């Protein structure tokens, strides 16, 4: 009995230690948000296989997406690719920093890349972003705390991304391109990872598959709201309180840890991934690598927490991928998509 008690005590201490580490990382990660989810964006030309597709949102105005048609011309198999925290109005990182559009279309999957939504979490916000009711003024560079008073998307109007993707974009794709509006896939990185799971949980007829890479999947954990607050200030100057009041129903509705039973009950096929936070030799070792390590450690703590939650629910609809090396960078997210594609292909359309 003493031996069993000692074992339980040791395991408890180990769990508390891991949890404390996760909290510590959550509190320190805002010091590294200068990288956020950019992973070193580079200037690149648009992929010639894609074309622009503009759909009006009653709340947000015209929203542009990039569409990549399946190689075999089918309209039945569709996946949405969601960007990260710094999602600009000009392009998706998935197009400019990876080759996933080509890889997916070669697997005869149509790809939809919504453009924009910086710091939005692809959610329907409570109000336009503002601090102390001050109206925005000036332009936004997309980085830095001075952007709290700058103009930008989601400041002169209310973000309504969930509604846009589920209603306006979905049906426009069906009516104008003939795309199947049901049993689609959706995946995203970082902010887009939790956004993808939220869309799948609340719209199971639209999404039969969801993937999260380096996502923040336990946003109600101690320290997480303040970590997100600081990251959103740095990524465009957005106020998390405008998105959802603290710890209320709207905030909890966005938390994958909270709505995990819905994903199990819908039998949504999930691909959940995060890197170890350790760099590979090709990453080098500089400030960007250190930032990427800290951010990925936070994402890993969140993702492991979500894994334990799903395991406690007896969910068997999830594939977990935890590579031995991986920081918060497009290189690793691109590689993860390639690993995921066979599972995605088998569970959409």
Image: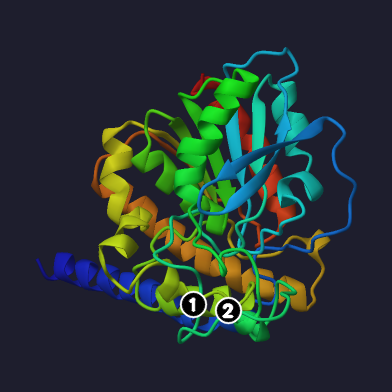
Identify the secondary structure beneath mark 2. helix
Q: Which mark is residue 233?
A: 2
**Within the image, what quadrant is residue 124 found in?**
bottom left
Seen from the viewer's position, the closer of residues 252 and 160 is 160
State the image coordinates of residue 29 (x, y, percent, origin top left).
Answer: 56, 78
Residue 162 sits above or below residue 168 on the image: below
- Residue sitting at x 79%, y 50%: 97
Which residue corresponds to mark 1? Answer: 229
Viewer can see residue 210: no
Identify the residue at the far left of this view.
1
Residue 143, horizontal then vertical, whole percent? 70, 76
> What is the distance, in whole Å, between disc 1 and disc 2 at their CAs?
6 Å
Asked if marks 1 and 2 touch (Cβ < 8 Å), the reply is yes
Quadrant of the snapshot with the N terminus: bottom left
Left or right: 251 in relation to 287: left
The one nearer the camera, 200 or 163, is 163
Q: Above or below — where is 50 with respect to 22? A: above
Q: Decide if residue 97 is in sight here.
A: yes
How far across and down, in percent of the image, does residue 201 sit?
36, 42
Viewer-nearest residue: 35 or 45 = 45
The secondary structure type at the circle numbered 1 is helix
Determine the residue positioned at 69% across, 29% down. 104
Judge from the rendering whether residue 285 lies leftward or rightward of residue 76; answer left or right: right
Q: Is residue 296 above or below residue 113?
A: below
Q: Which residue occupies 33% across, 64% down?
A: 251
* Above or below: residue 12 compared with residue 186: below
């Amino acid at each position: 009995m003493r031996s069993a008690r000692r074992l339980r005590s040791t395991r408890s201490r180990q769990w508390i230690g891991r949890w404390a580490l996760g909290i510590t990382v959550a509190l320190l990660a805002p010091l590294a948000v200068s990288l956020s989810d950019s992973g070193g964006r580079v200037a690149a030309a648009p992929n010639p296989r894609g074309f622009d597709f503009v759909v009006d949102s009653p709340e947000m105005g015209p929203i542009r997406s990039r569409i990549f048609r399946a190689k075999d011309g089918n309209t039945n198999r569709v996946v949405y690719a969601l960007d990260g925290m710094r999602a600009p109005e000009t392009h998706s990182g998935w197009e400019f920093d990876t080759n996933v559009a080509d890889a997916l279309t070669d697997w005869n999957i149509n790809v939809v890349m919504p453009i924009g939504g910086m710091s939005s979490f692809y959610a329907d916000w409570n109000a336009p972003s503002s601090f102390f009711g001050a109206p925005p003024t000036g332009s936004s560079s997309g980085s830095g705390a001075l952007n709290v008073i700058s103009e930008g998307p989601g400041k002169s109007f209310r973000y309504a991304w969930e509604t846009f993707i589920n209603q306006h974009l979905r049906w426009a794709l069906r009516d104008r391109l003939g795309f199947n509006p049901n049993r689609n896939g959706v995946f995203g990185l970082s902010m887009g990872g939790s956004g993808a799971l939220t869309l799948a949980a609340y719209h199971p007829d639209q999404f039969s598959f969801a993937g999260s890479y380096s996502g923040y999947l336990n946003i109600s954990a101690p320290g997480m709201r303040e970590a997100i607050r600081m990251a959103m200030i740095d990524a465009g100057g957005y106020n998390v309180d405008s998105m959802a009041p603290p710890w209320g129903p709207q905030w909890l509705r966005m938390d994958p840890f909270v709505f995990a039973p819905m994903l199990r009950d819908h039998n949504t096929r999930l691909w959940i991934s995060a890197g170890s936070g350790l760099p590979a030799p090709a990453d080098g070792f500089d400030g960007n690598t250190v930032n990427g390590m800290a951010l990925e450690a936070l994402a890993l703590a969140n993702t492991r927490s979500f894994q334990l939650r799903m395991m406690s629910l007896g969910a068997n609809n999830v594939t977990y991928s935890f590579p031995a090396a991986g920081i918060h960078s497009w290189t690793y997210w691109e590689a993860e998509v390639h690993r995921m594609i066979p599972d995605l292909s088998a569970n959409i359309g």
